[in-house]
């Protein structure tokens, strides 16, 4: 094998090329990204970076010089024009690049508000890229008014940052409650009260009817409950969709993203996928994991399998979210839970998801010990007695030895 091309210069793409070199691959590696900057961290964009607490250079996963020093060709600000899977080539403008193995680490794109309700007005933003955050930063200012559309983690994090910058913030969630797709009512209740205590107006079961604009810029909104209010800034946090354009060019199979097997291989044996764009087998179903942890781990597994390791990637999901002074840490996937055990330690709190007697996941709020023990229990396939979990005075550590 002489040439490996990785399309997508985000966390997954950067992790893949680094692992290829660490595993001893000596051939040519090309990393293609459509943004003009080297790979960077996305989670701090809408938090520390937007708040001015993190400089641009600290966002970068590695100094740009590292790629050249390790023989990795960066093709930044580049769009893939064609992929010929039969000829095993990728076309960038006038350049036709051959590959022996191709990795699609193309990530995802935020859903945008429809143009027919004003989603194309100036002042309407999404949170995904460095350019997105740089564009909204001047409007995230004290005394201005922000409307956050969507009550998932992205929307809640955006609301927290806007409040910390002194904005008047309204958050609307069209479904009956915030975090409806990803968390239990107990976790939603916790974060609803947290945001309301910080002065955010949280409206559930209320959506956006339309945005009002003047001279092409948003000035207000009409909500589905009939309310009309002025706003200076609108942020949409209504989900993401996998970037599948290059995959469609290559003709590989799709299934809620780019379908891969347990090795990260697509329907074409020379093409792999990793990160937000990839769907993978997990517990008898096919899922996409939208997290930094999965992007890194899956991409590193793909790198090793390209080099012949033939190892299954078995995800051990974990996630996090920072809102005000609360750090939420999540271990596992709660899909299929039928009860939630609340462990209330006052400032530290955790919610433990069970399906029957089986522990599936833990949401830990400012409870790093509960999170770490829960994570280790889940990974070990151990399910403690819910009565022990519910008692905040019980010592959880002995559960690891049970």
Image (tube, rainbow, N blue to C red):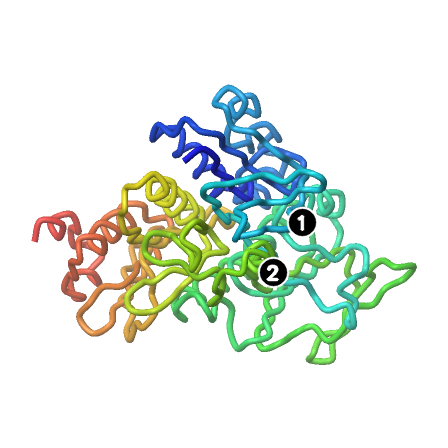
Where is residue 282 drawn, in percent x and y?
32, 63
At label 2, counting other C-alpha atoms closer than 10 Å, the crowd grade (few under 14, some 14-19, many 20 or more) is many
Mark 1: secondary structure: loop
Mark 2 or 1, which is nearer the eye?
Answer: 1
Residue lying at 85% horizontally and 58% vertically, measured from the top left: 217
Where is residue 81 drawn, in percent x and y?
67, 49
Residue lying at 52% horizontally and 26% vertically, measured from the top left: 67
Where is residue 193 drawn, in percent x and y?
49, 63
Is residue 198 visible to us here?
no
* Above/below status of 192 relative to 393: below
- Return the residue found at the far front: 87
Front-lying residue, 300 or 379: 300
Snapshot quadrant of residue 278:
bottom left
Q: 12 left or right of 334?
A: right
The residue where tag 2 is placed is 237
Inter-mark Cα distance, 2 to 1: 29 Å
Q: Earlier in the sequence, mark 2 or mark 1?
A: 1
Is residue 179 visible to us here?
yes
Residue lying at 22% horizontally and 49% vertically, measured from the top left: 376
At label 1, counting other C-alpha atoms closer than 10 Å, the crowd grade (few under 14, some 14-19, many 20 or more) is some
* Above/below status of 362 relative to 46: below
Mark 2: secondary structure: loop
Q: 275 left or right of 173?
A: left
Front-lying residue, 315 or 221: 315
Q: 92 left or right of 308?
A: right
Front-lying residue, 287 or 1: 1
- Return the residue found at the far right: 215
Do the residues bearing badges 2 and 1 touch, measured as CB atoms within 8 Å?
no
* Above/below status of 195 relative to 72: below
- Quadrant of the drawing holding the N terminus: top left
Snapshot quadrant of residue 285:
bottom left
The residue where tag 1 is placed is 81
């Amino acid at each position: 094998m002489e040439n490996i091309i990785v399309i997508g210069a985000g966390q997954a793409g950067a992790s893949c090329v680094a692992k290829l070199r660490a595993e001893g691959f000596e051939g040519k590696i090309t990393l293609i990204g459509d943004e003009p900057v080297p790979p960077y961290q996305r989670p701090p964009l809408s938090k520390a970076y937007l708040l001015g607490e993190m400089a641009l250079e600290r966002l970068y996963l590695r100094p740009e010089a590292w790629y050249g020093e390790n023989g990795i060709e960066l093709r930044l600000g580049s769009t893939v024009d064609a992929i010929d899977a039969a000829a095993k080539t990728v076309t960038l403008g006038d350049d036709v690049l051959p590959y022996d193995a191709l990795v699609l680490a193309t990530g995802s794109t935020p859903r945008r508000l429809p143009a027919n309700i004003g989603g194309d007005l100036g002042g309407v933003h999404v949170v995904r890229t460095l350019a997105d955050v740089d564009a909204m930063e001047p409007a995230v200012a004290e005394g201005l008014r922000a409307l956050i559309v969507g009550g998932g983690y992205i929307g809640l994090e955006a609301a927290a940052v806007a409040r910390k910058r002194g904005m008047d913030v309204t958050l609307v969630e069209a479904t009956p409650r915030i975090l409806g797709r990803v968390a239990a009512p107990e976790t939603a209740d916790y974060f609803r009260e947290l945001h309301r205590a910080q002065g955010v107006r949280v409206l559930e079961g209320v959506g956006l009817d339309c945005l009002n604009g003047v001279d092409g810029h948003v000035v207000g909104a009409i909500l589905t409950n009939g309310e009309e209010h002025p706003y200076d800034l609108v942020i949409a946090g209504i989900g993401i969709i996998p970037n599948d354009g290059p995959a469609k060019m290559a003709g590989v199979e799709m299934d809620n993203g780019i379908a891969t097997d347990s090795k990260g291989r697509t329907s074409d044996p020379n093409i792999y996928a990793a990160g937000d764009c990839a769907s993978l087998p997990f517990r008898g179903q096919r899922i996409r994991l939208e997290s930094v942890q999965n992007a890194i781990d899956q991409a590193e597994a793909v790198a090793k399998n390209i080099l012949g390791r033939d190892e299954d990637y078995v995800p051990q999901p974990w996630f996090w979210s920072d809102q005000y002074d609360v750090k939420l840490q999540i271990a596992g996937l709660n899909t299929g839970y039928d009860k939630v055990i609340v462990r209330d330690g006052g400032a530290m709190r955790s919610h433990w998801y069970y399906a029957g007697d089986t522990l599936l996941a833990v949401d830990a709020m400012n409870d790093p010990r509960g999170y770490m023990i829960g994570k280790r229990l889940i990974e070990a396939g151990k399910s403690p007695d819910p009565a022990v979990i519910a008692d905040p005075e019980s010592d959880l550590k002995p559960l690891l030895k049970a």
